[in-house]
Amino acid sequence: MQKQKMPIRTGEEYIESLRGRNLKIYLFGELVKNYVDHKMIRPSINAVAETYDLAVREEELATAHSSITGQRVNRFLHIVESAQDLVLQNKMQRKMGQNTGTCFQRCVGMDAINSLHSTTFEIDEKHGTKYHERLLDFIKMVQRGNLIIGGAMTDPKGDRSKTPAEQEDPDMFLHVVKKDEKGVYVTGAKAHQTGCINSHWIIIMPTVRLTENDKDYAIVGAIPADVEGITYIYGRQSCDTRSMEDGDIDSGNSQYAGQEAMMIFENVFIPWDKVFMHGEYEFASMLIERFTCYHRRSYVCKTGLGDVLIGAAATIADYNGIPNVSHIKDKLVEMTHLNESIFAAGIASSYSAHKMKSGVWLNEDMLAQVCKHNVTRFPYEIGRLAQDIAGGLVVTMPSEKDFRNPETGPMLKKYLVGRKGVDVENRMRVLRLIENMTLGRNAVGYLTESMHGAGSPQAQRIQIGRQMQLGYKKKLAKHLAKTSDVDEDIKPEPSDYFKRVFKISNIEN
Amino acid sequence: MQKQKMPIRTGEEYIESLRGRNLKIYLFGELVKNYVDHKMIRPSINAVAETYDLAVREEELATAHSSITGQRVNRFLHIVESAQDLVLQNKMQRKMGQNTGTCFQRCVGMDAINSLHSTTFEIDEKHGTKYHERLLDFIKMVQRGNLIIGGAMTDPKGDRSKTPAEQEDPDMFLHVVKKDEKGVYVTGAKAHQTGCINSHWIIIMPTVRLTENDKDYAIVGAIPADVEGITYIYGRQSCDTRSMEDGDIDSGNSQYAGQEAMMIFENVFIPWDKVFMHGEYEFASMLIERFTCYHRRSYVCKTGLGDVLIGAAATIADYNGIPNVSHIKDKLVEMTHLNESIFAAGIASSYSAHKMKSGVWLNEDMLAQVCKHNVTRFPYEIGRLAQDIAGGLVVTMPSEKDFRNPETGPMLKKYLVGRKGVDVENRMRVLRLIENMTLGRNAVGYLTESMHGAGSPQAQRIQIGRQMQLGYKKKLAKHLAKTSDVDEDIKPEPSDYFKRVFKISNIEN
Amino acid sequence: MQKQKMPIRTGEEYIESLRGRNLKIYLFGELVKNYVDHKMIRPSINAVAETYDLAVREEELATAHSSITGQRVNRFLHIVESAQDLVLQNKMQRKMGQNTGTCFQRCVGMDAINSLHSTTFEIDEKHGTKYHERLLDFIKMVQRGNLIIGGAMTDPKGDRSKTPAEQEDPDMFLHVVKKDEKGVYVTGAKAHQTGCINSHWIIIMPTVRLTENDKDYAIVGAIPADVEGITYIYGRQSCDTRSMEDGDIDSGNSQYAGQEAMMIFENVFIPWDKVFMHGEYEFASMLIERFTCYHRRSYVCKTGLGDVLIGAAATIADYNGIPNVSHIKDKLVEMTHLNESIFAAGIASSYSAHKMKSGVWLNEDMLAQVCKHNVTRFPYEIGRLAQDIAGGLVVTMPSEKDFRNPETGPMLKKYLVGRKGVDVENRMRVLRLIENMTLGRNAVGYLTESMHGAGSPQAQRIQIGRQMQLGYKKKLAKHLAKTSDVDEDIKPEPSDYFKRVFKISNIEN
Amino acid sequence: MQKQKMPIRTGEEYIESLRGRNLKIYLFGELVKNYVDHKMIRPSINAVAETYDLAVREEELATAHSSITGQRVNRFLHIVESAQDLVLQNKMQRKMGQNTGTCFQRCVGMDAINSLHSTTFEIDEKHGTKYHERLLDFIKMVQRGNLIIGGAMTDPKGDRSKTPAEQEDPDMFLHVVKKDEKGVYVTGAKAHQTGCINSHWIIIMPTVRLTENDKDYAIVGAIPADVEGITYIYGRQSCDTRSMEDGDIDSGNSQYAGQEAMMIFENVFIPWDKVFMHGEYEFASMLIERFTCYHRRSYVCKTGLGDVLIGAAATIADYNGIPNVSHIKDKLVEMTHLNESIFAAGIASSYSAHKMKSGVWLNEDMLAQVCKHNVTRFPYEIGRLAQDIAGGLVVTMPSEKDFRNPETGPMLKKYLVGRKGVDVENRMRVLRLIENMTLGRNAVGYLTESMHGAGSPQAQRIQIGRQMQLGYKKKLAKHLAKTSDVDEDIKPEPSDYFKRVFKISNIEN
C-alpha cells in the first residue's frame, strides 16, 4: 500500500507515487515488472497525471473547497456541495477530454464517493451502522493525500438469468468469503476496470440489485490497489502495440490513452474501517442508481474528445485546402451540433440537481439518462463524419518508418502534399489522430466505451422508461381530447420527474 | 386602443378585454365582425387566456416579482433578473404546452421586451438617447395592466438577394415613411405574426442586419393592436374549419389552437414615447441576435406538446390493449428521449446565462441554437412514432356526425371497439387528438412552426458555425497530434463560447 | 350490380360506369345520394379514372397481354407472367403516383388476384376443389369488362389477444353466417378500405392466420360493390372539406385524392361461383403472406408522390429565388436519394421474382419487406425537408378567398411576391400542394398510409426477422473466427432467402 | 512479368504464381523480400486466392461463358453480356464478402475492363484508333491465364483547385513523360491502390475530367505489376501488426484481410499494344463515369461483410445467453434491414442495365449512386449496433497470450464464461472478429473504404444531383398545382433517368 506522507501535487509526483508498488499485472501473457515505464501502459498514466497538472494550472476549475477537510482539494475527490459543483465537474471533464483526447479514468472514483455519501448516510439512518463516518474518514485521507480512487463495479455475471446467489459458480459476483474481527475477505472478479492499475485505492461495489439471499454480495469497501490477492490482466485495445513502436506519429496520440483491466480477487482483505456496506442488500440498488445517475452524466467528458476530433477534421480540411467548401463546413456544423447536444444534456442534468439528506447533491436522473443515451449515438456519427472529411488516406497511409526511410520518405513528401505551405508530416500526424479516435486506441474510449461505459443503451432506455410518467402524460392528452376517463389513470408512478421539473427552486430538497 | 383601468387577472377577463376593439381582420375574404366569438378564431384566444389562468393557479411558476414595478407580474411580462428566471420561463413554457397542446402566442412579446432591455441600454450608452427609459415606462404600463404584447419581426423580404433599401418596392420591409413632432409613421407588412390579433400591443422590430442606407428601416416601436392603418389577414391552418363544425371530436383539440396572421401597415402612427430605436441601424443585428437567442430557447414549449402527444400515443396503445408490447414501449421511450433532449438543451442554455450591462440576463447562445435545431428534427420523429403507435384509423376514421347518426353510430360503436372496457368515443377522441397534432391544426405549431419559427434550420446552422471556434479546436487537435504548427492558427474568432463554458461562475458578467 | 356490356376504356367511361349504382354510403352523418358528383368524393374517383386514361396514353406501360383472355388488358388486372411484368407494375405505379400525387386505389385488387392465383391453385391441389377455375373465370370477366377490383382484408379485430373464434362478438372478423345451395352469407366489417366505393367488385379475404376453430372465417369471395347488405361509412381525411370550398387553390391538389371507407357487412350473399376459399383455414396465412409480399412492394407508388413533392420543393425554391443555394440543393439531393432508395428496393424485389406452381410469378419477399419498411420512414423525412425548403408560409398563408377579395387580394399580391417574374398565385398554388402532401388530404396517403398500409412497421420487422437466417450468418462468422462449434447450429431455418439470393437464375422455379 | 503458360486454377496455384516476381515493396521502412509469406501481407493474398477457389466450388456463380474467348472464365474477368451478368457479379461479390469478411480486391479490375470495353469502342468510332481491338487482345490473354488485374486510378491530386496541367509539380497526376516507337513512359503516383501488389497486371486510368491542356494525362494502359520503375509503399491498417503476433485469436480474422498500397511510377514503360487511350482527353470523363457506375454498385460486396457481422453479433448474443431478448432481436432485424437495403439498390441497378454500342452492358447509374451512398452510411450503423450487442468486453478483453498463460488462462476461462455450454475461447474469437470489423483491420474495409472507395459521399451526391431531373419533377408538381407556368421549364436536362425508368424493356439499347 502506498504510504503517502505529503500530498501529491503534480502529475510528475503522481507518476512517482506509482513506483515501487507491488502490483501483479499480466500483459501479453507475462508479468509486467516496471509498469510505470511500460511504453504501452504509460500513456494511460499520463492521462491521469493531467488531472493533477490541470488542478495546478486551473485551480478554480479543477479544485474545490471541501467542507470535509476544510481544504482546497482536487475536484475529482470533492463531495459536491451544490448544483454548481456538479456543473463544474462537467466543465472539468470536458476540459480534461480536450487536453488528453482520451479517458482520464478518474470519474468512476469521483462518482463512487459521491453516491456512497448519501447511501451510507441512509443505511446508517435505517440500521444504526457507522458507514458514513468511516466513509468520511476515508474521504479525508484521500483528499489530504490527493490520491486516485478507482471504482470497481462490473462483475463478470456468469449466467445472466440468475441472481448472484443462484450462480453455479458463486464467484461470478464478488462476495465475502470470510470475516473475522479485523475485517472481511472477498473473492471474485471485476471486468473492464477503468484505470484500476493507475489508482491508489479501489472501492468495490455491487453491480446488480440484490435480494435477501445475496447478503454476502452486499459488500462495499476500499482497498489499496496493491493489496495482496489481486491479479490484474491488462485489456487489449485496438492498435495498442503502436505505442511500443519507435516514433510518435503512427500511434496518433502518443501521449495519452485509456486503461481497462480485469481484476481477479482471491481472499482479498478489507479491514472493518474501510467497509461501507456489509449485508444491507436492500441498499444495493439505491447505490447503483445514484452512482449511474452521476456517472451517466459524467460522459460529458466525451464532448472534450469530440472537440478534439472536430478540430482534427477541421485541420485536415484546412491542410487539404478545402476548409470553406460548403459540404465540409456543413459537416463540421453537424458534428458541433451533436457534440453540444450531449454537453447540454449533461449540464442540464447537473444544474437540475437537488440536495440529499446527507448534504451531497444529486443531479437529475432523467436528464443523465438522456445525456448518456445520446453518447451511445452521437460520437459514432461524429466519427463517421470525421472519416468522411479526412479522406481515404486515413486508413491507407504508409508507416512513420517509411516516412523516415531515405528512399521512400522523399516520395511520400512529394506525393502526400496537400495545399501549398502544409508540411506533409503535420498532415500525417493529424490523419493518424483521426485514425486513433475513430478506429485506433482512443476509439475504444470515444466509441465503444461511450456505448457501454456506465451502462449499455438498453440500461438507459429502461431508466427512461421508468421515469417517463405515462400516467401523467396520458392525463394531459385525455384532458385535451375530453375523454370521459380523464381521472381513471391516477395510479402512483415509479417516478416524480415532473414534480421535480416544475418545482420552482431546487435549492431546498 | 385598449383602455385598461384595472389589471387583467383571469382568462375570462382577458377575453373580455378583447371585445369592442376595432380591428380590421379578414378571413375567407370577409371582414370579421365579432372575432372574439368566431368559432375558428376562439381556440387561439383560449390558448392565450390560459397564460392568465395558469398565473392564478400556479403563481410561483407563472408570475415573478418585478423589480421594475415592485409587483408580482405575469412571467411573460417579466424582465429576467437571474439565470433561474430564464429556467422558470422554460418550465412555464413546457407547462403551457402541456395544458394547451398548442402555441399560446405569448413568448414573442416576452423575448422582445427582454432583448430590447439590453439593446436600448446599449444604444443609449452610445448615442445618448432615451430609449431605455421609454421602454421601462412601457414595461411598467403593460406589467401593471397585465397586457398581451405581440412582437412583429418577419418582413415579407421581396428579393432576398437585396437589402431593404435596394428593393424595387420599398415596402418589402417595414419602414418609416414620415415623421413629425408627435411621432413616426410606418408602412410595410409583417408576415405570419403569431397571436397578433390576440395582443393588446405590438412591438415592431427589424428582421435583418441593416446598413447605413437602411436607416429608415431601423425602427422599433410599440403600437396598440387596434391602431388605425393595420389590416390583418388571417392565415389558414390545416383542418382549420373543423373548429366551425358542430361537435367537439373531429377538431381533435376543440379548445385550443394557435394563430398566425399577416399584418399590413399603411401609415401607422407611433408616438415618440413608444419609439425604442430610430435610425441606429448598427444595433439592428444586436437586437435580432439577442431576440433569437432568447426565442430559440423558448421552443422548449414544444416539449409540453411532446408530452401531450406521448400521452396520447400511450393512451391509444392502452385502449388498443397493447401498452406492454415491447416495440410499443420502446417507441414511447424513444419519443421521451427525444423530447427530453430538447428540454435539456433549452434549460442548459437558460442555466448558462450571463448578466448584461442593463441588468437583464441573457441565456447561452450556442445552446439556444442547439435547442432550436433539435426542435426542427425531433418533433417530426415523435410525430411519426405517434402515428406508428396510433394505427391507420387515425386517418380513416368516420366523422363525429356518423358517430352520432342513429344508423351508423351503433355500427361504429360495435366495430371500433378496442380492448374490453374502453369507450369507443374516448378512442375516437384520442385518435383525433393525434391527427390534430401530426396532420391537423396543431401540427402547424408542433411541426411546421417548430421548423420555421425563430428561424429556419439553416439559420441555426449559421449561428452554430459562427460560434464553433474551429481555431480553438484545431489547436487542441494539433497539440495532441504534435504538429509543428500548433500556434499558427491563433486568429481572433467570432465567438468566445469556450471562454464562457469554462468560466467558473456565471454570476458576474 | 353493374352490368357491363362493353369494356370500359377511358376515365370518362369509368366515371359513367359508377353512376346509377345503389350504394349505401354515409358521410358526415348523412346518406350520400349522388356520390359520383360529390365534391369531396370526386377527387378519389378521378384518381382511379387516371388508371384508365394512362392505359390509353401509355399502352405498353399500363396494359399487358393476358394469356388468360388472349387480350391486352389493363395491367392492374393482369396476372403476372414474368419478373418483368412485376417490374412494370412498379413502373406503372410510380407513373400513376407522379400523375395524381395521391393513392389511385387499384393496387389492392391487383395484388389480391395475383396472390389468389397461386393460392387457389395450391388449395385445389390439396383439397381437389375448383377455386382456381372459378378465379380464372372471374378474372376473365373483369379483364374483359376492364373493371375495378377492390380487396377487403383488414377486419376490426376486437380484442387483439384473441383469435377470430374466441372473440366475444363473433363479428369482429368477417365470417360465414349461413350457407345454402346458392352460396354463402357473410357478416362483419372491413376497416379503412382503400377505394372500395370506387370499385366494381370487392374481393374479401381473411386478415390473420387461422386455426381449425376459425373455419367460418376462412372465406374468400368476390362481390359487386353494390351488393345488398353493405353499408359504407366514409373516412375523414385531414383537410377533406377544402375540396368542397369554392376555388381550386386551397385544396392543394384539387383534382386527385385517395379514399378509405369502413364497410359493414350484414348477411351479404356470395354465390358459389364467386367463392375462392371456404373453410381451408390452413391456407389463410399463405394467402396473406403472398398478398403482403406483392403489396409491400407495391408501395413503390410512393416514389411517384415523392417525385411530385421534390418537384414542388424545387419549384418553391425557384420561386423564392434560391434554387442554387447549397443547402437547398443538398436537401433536394437527399430527398431524391431517399426516394430512389425506396424505388430500388421495390424493383429489386420484383426483378428477383420466381415462378409459382400456378404459373404466376411472385416477387422476392425479403426485399418487399425492406421496400415497405423504408416507406414507413423516408416519406416522413422527405416531407420534413419539403417543409424546410417551403418556408413557414406553407402553414400561414391566407385563403384563396382573401386572394380573390378586391381589398386584400392586391395586398397579398404586393407582399407575397417572390423573385422577380414569379406570379404570386403560382407561388400560393405550389405552397398549397406542399401543404396537401405533408399535412393535408394527400399527407394521409403519402405519410400515414405509407406507415400503416400493407402492414405497420412491426409487421415488416417480424417478416425480416423470420427471413434473416441467423443460423446461416452465424456459421459465416464462426467460420472466419475459427470457433470450434462452426457446425453446431445447423438447424432448419424458416426461410431460404440466401438460397434464392445465390441461385444463378430465377427463370425456372 | 508473370509468364503464365497454364491458366491458374486454384487459390494455391494463384499464390504460387506470385512467387519469384521482382516487386519493390516497402513496409515499415524496409524492403520486403518474400512478400508472399509475410505474415502481415499474406491475409490479403488469401482473400484474392478465394476468388479462384470459389470459381472451382461454385462454377455457375463465379465463372461465366465468355464470348470473347469462347471459354468459361472467372467472372471477375468477364465482359458482361446481359443484365443478368451484372446481377451475378453482385451475387458473387456478396458471397465473396461472406467468405472472407474483407475486401478481396478483384472488383476494380473487373469494373475497369468493362468500362474500357465501351469507352475504347467509342473512342475508336470517333478517332479511328485501334484501342478496342488491343483491349480485346489483352482481355483474351488475361481470361486465358486467369490473371488478376488491378485498376489504378486515384492520383495524389496536389492542389485540388488546379487541373493536372496547372499543378506546380506535373507529377501530381500520372502522365506520359516520353514516347517512342515501342510505347510510352509514365511518371507519377497512384494512392491507396487496392490489391495492387497481389495483381498480375495493373491498368492505369485517369481520375479526373481532362481538358485539352491535359493531353499527356489522358493515358490508359496495362502494365505487369512487376514492371520496372514502380515502388510500392504498403499502407498501414488499424491493428495490422496483430497478424504478425503468435496465435490466431487476437487478429479477429486471421486468414483474410484487404490491401492498399501507394504506387510510385518513375518512367514506367507501356508498349503500344497495351495502350488503350492516349491523348483523347475528352473521353476521360466518359471512362470515369462508366467505371464509377459499375464500381459504386460493386460495393454490394459490403453486404457480404454485413452478413458476417450480423452473424457475429447473433453468435455473441447466443453465447451471452440472450438471443431472444426483444431489444437484441430488434437490433439484428435493423442490421438486416439496412444490409438488405444496400443489396436491393445494388441489384436494382444491375437489373436495370442497358446495352452499350460495344455490346457490353452498363448498369443504371442513378441507382448505383444510391447503392454506394447508402454504403457510406449503413455499415457504420450496423457496426455500431454490433458493438452494442457485443458488450464492452469487445474492447477490454485480455490478449490470447494471457489466455494461454498457465496462471491467467484458467482465471479467464473461469470468469469470461457466458451461458452454460459455451467455450470461452469461442466467445473470445467472436468478440475479436467483431473488433476486427468495427475497429480493427477489416474495419478499414468495412467502414472507411465503404466511405471513400469508388468516391466519397459528396461524389455520389453530385451525381445524384446531376441526374435528379428537377425540371421534370417541377413539371409534375406544377401540373397538379395547376400553375400557369407548367410548360416554362422545359429545358434540356443533364440526365434522362426517367426516360430509362419508364422504358418498357431494357433488352434493346
Image (tube, coloured by chain):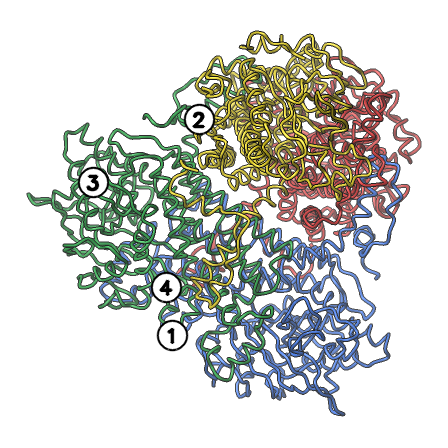
Chain colours: A yellow, B green, C blue, D red
Cα separation, mark 2 vs mark 3, equals 42 Å
| Subunit of label 4 | B
Give the residue pinned by disc 1: B246
* Residue D15 quadrant: top right
Identify residue for label 4.
B255
Amino acid under disc 2: Gln
Label 2 lies in what chain? B
Q: Distance from label 4 to label 1 (Cα)?
A: 13 Å
Query: CB of mark 2 within 8 Å of CB of mark 4?
Result: no
Q: What residue is at 46 percent from the left and 15 percent from the top?
A: A71
Asked where in the image residue C410 lies, by quadrant, the reply is: bottom left
Report if the CB atoms under discs 3 and 4 are less than 8 Å apart. Answer: no
Q: Mark 4 or 1, which is nearer the eye?
A: 4
Give the label, 2 or 4, closer to the camera: 4
Q: Nearer the viewer, mark 3 or mark 4?
A: 3
Amino acid carrying mark 3 in the image: Gly
Q: Nearer the viewer, residue B107 or A223?
A: A223
The Cα atoms of the two marked residues, 1 and 2, are separated by 57 Å
Is residue A19 shown left or right of residue A490? right
The answer to whether residue A87 is left or right of residue D497 is left
The quarter holding residue A226 reads top right
Q: Residues within 10 Å of mark 1 (few under 14, many from 20)?
A: few
> Which residue is nearer to you in this view: D46 or B422?
B422
Q: Determine whether A244 is above or below D305 in the image.
A: above
Q: Earlier in the sequence, mark 2 or mark 3?
A: 3
Q: Which numbered tag is attached to residue B469?
A: 2
Point out the tag, 1 or 3, that comes first from the N-terminus.
Answer: 3
Q: Is residue D508 visible?
A: no
Return the disc, 1 or 2, that comes first in the chain's sequence.
Answer: 1
